[in-house]
Image (cartoon, grey):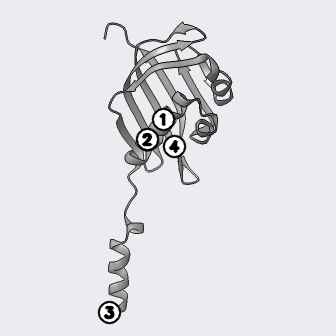
Amino acid sequence: MRYLIALLFLVHSPLAQAADPAKEVKAAADALNAAFEKHDAKTIRALMTPDHLAITPYAGKQRVKDQIRTLPVLKYDKYSAGPMSMNVVNDNCVLVTYALDLKGTYQGKPLPSHSLVASLWVKSDGKWRELHYQETPVVGR
């Protein structure tokens, strides 16, 4: 009987509940987007893998160190991420896609106002981090 009670406790305990990768990644993606808006380099580094690669129409191909270095020339007046679609590949990998509306400048030049974003998130050492980010401008939206 003791074993049955222990088993029931384990099955219904919060620790036994499976993590929801989509919710965890959504929270991490929101935190990363906010960190870029605030130019918070420490949080940006913490939420990206060391080998992270970003591809954007305004900065081209950048690694983490390049993104941090160019934060002062990235100015947002508006950053509006649309609803995020979470494609859970497995418990350690999630593909995130969303529409992005921007107003601002990079090195004094206007940012594309409408883009589509795809980012790949991986879980390592128990933490979700962005591995890849791609922003593609959309014309006539």
The residue singled out by tag 4 in the image is 122
Kindly report the distance in space between the C-alpha atoms of the residues bearing marks 1 and 2: 6 Å
Discs 4, 1 touching: Cβ within 8 Å: yes
Kindly report the distance in space between the C-alpha atoms of the residues bearing marks 3 and 4: 41 Å
Task: Describe residue 120's horizontal placement relative to residue 108 as left or right.
Answer: left
The residue singled out by tag 2 in the image is 94
Name which of mark 4 and mark 2 comes first in the sequence: 2
Determine which quarter of the picture holds residue 9: bottom left
Q: Amino acid at mark 1?
A: Leu
Name the spot of residue 126 as percent of width and height, x first. 54, 54
Task: Describe residue 130's horizontal placement relative to residue 102 as left or right.
Answer: right
- SS state under label 2: strand
Determine which quarter of the picture holds residue 63: top right
Name which of mark 3 and mark 4 comes first in the sequence: 3
Task: Describe residue 134's horizontal placement relative to residue 53 as left or right.
Answer: left
Residue 97, compared with residue 74, is above or below; it is: below
Name which of mark 1 and mark 2 comes first in the sequence: 2
Crowding around mark 4 (Cα neighbors within 10 Å: few <14, some 14 to 19, many 20+) is many
Kindly report the distance in space between the C-alpha atoms of the residues bearing marks 4 and 1: 7 Å
The residue singled out by tag 1 in the image is 120
Q: Amino acid at mark 3?
A: Met
Name which of mark 1 and mark 3 comes first in the sequence: 3
Name the spot of residue 43 as percent of width and height, x first. 59, 39
Q: Amino acid at mark 4?
A: Val
Discs 1, 2 touching: Cβ within 8 Å: yes
- SS state under label 4: strand
Crowding around mark 2 (Cα neighbors within 10 Å: few <14, some 14 to 19, many 20+) is many
The residue singled out by tag 3 in the image is 1
Image quarter of the C terminus = top left
Crowding around mark 1 (Cα neighbors within 10 Å: few <14, some 14 to 19, many 20+) is many
